[in-house]
Image (tube, rainbow, N blue to C red):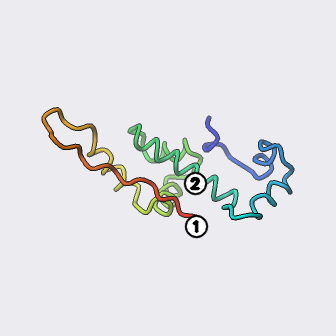
């Protein structure tokens, strides 16, 4: 199981970073860093994006493999972070496979993620 799919807690993340819980929280509050939750969601969306491109897994399976509690949660965060609906992204990617040998032009690339700080 990869870490985006794990149930993560602040205490667990702090321990993994070899910090106390208090220092871990303070590290995120200082500087211009996103919060721990936002970073975890961003990593999970990135992993979902990779799975959607590389596999034909069902949305529910992708949500489970990336640690989202449900397909609805995955859809919500995917759209919020990437600016497109998951079903639209998948349709674009699946129709833009490798070019045909007799095709002079490559199909358009799917949209790339635009991770927003919000």
Give the SS element for disc 1: loop
Most foreground residue, 56 or 44: 44
Q: Residue furthest left?
A: 102
Q: Quadrant of residue 94?
A: top left
Left or right placement of residue 67 versus residue 76 in this view:
right
Residue at image location 70% in from the left, 56% down from the top: 36
Is the C-beta separation of discs 1 and 2 under 8 Å? no
Task: Give coordinates of residue 57: x percent, y percent.
Answer: 42, 40
Asked whether 89 or 74 is in front, the reply is 89
Labelled disc at residue 43? none
Residue 54, by quadrant, is top left
- Most extreme residue toward the bottom, as rendered? 118
Q: Which mark is residue 42?
A: 2
Where does the image place residue 81, in percent across and percent down from the top left?
A: 50, 60
- Residue beneath the point at 49% across and 63% down: 80
Q: Residue 86 at x, y = what percent?
A: 41, 55
Q: Which mark is residue 118?
A: 1
- Say few, some or many: other residues with alpha carbon within 10 Å of mark 1 (under 14 / 14 to 19 / 20 or more): few
Q: Quadrant of the C terminus?
A: bottom right
In the rendered view, tell whether residue 103 sits above or below residue 59.
above
Residue in the image at 38% along x and 39% along y: 56
Quarter containing the N terminus: top right
Q: Along the line of sight, which residue is nearer the eye, 52 or 62?
A: 52
Classify residue 100 as left or right of residue 87: left
Relative side of 84 to 10, left or right: left
Secondary structure at numbered mark 2: helix
**Dot 2 surroundings within 10 Å: few (below 14), some, or many (20 or more)?**
some
Q: Earlier in the sequence, mark 1 or mark 2?
A: 2
Quarter occupied by residue 16: top right
């Amino acid at each position: 199981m990869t870490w985006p799919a794990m149930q993560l807690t602040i205490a667990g993340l702090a321990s993994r970073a070899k910090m106390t819980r208090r220092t871990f929280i303070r590290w995120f509050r200082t500087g211009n860093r996103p919060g721990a939750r936002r970073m975890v969601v961003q990593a999970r969306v990135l992993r979902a994006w990779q799975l959607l491109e590389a596999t034909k897994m069902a949305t529910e399976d992708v949500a489970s493999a990336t640690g989202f509690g449900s397909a609805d949660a995955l859809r919500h965060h995917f759209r919020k972070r990437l600016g497109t609906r998951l079903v639209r992204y998948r349709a674009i990617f699946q129709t833009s496979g490798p070019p045909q040998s007799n095709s002079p032009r490559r199909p358009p690339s799917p949209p790339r993620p635009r991770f927003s700080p919000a």
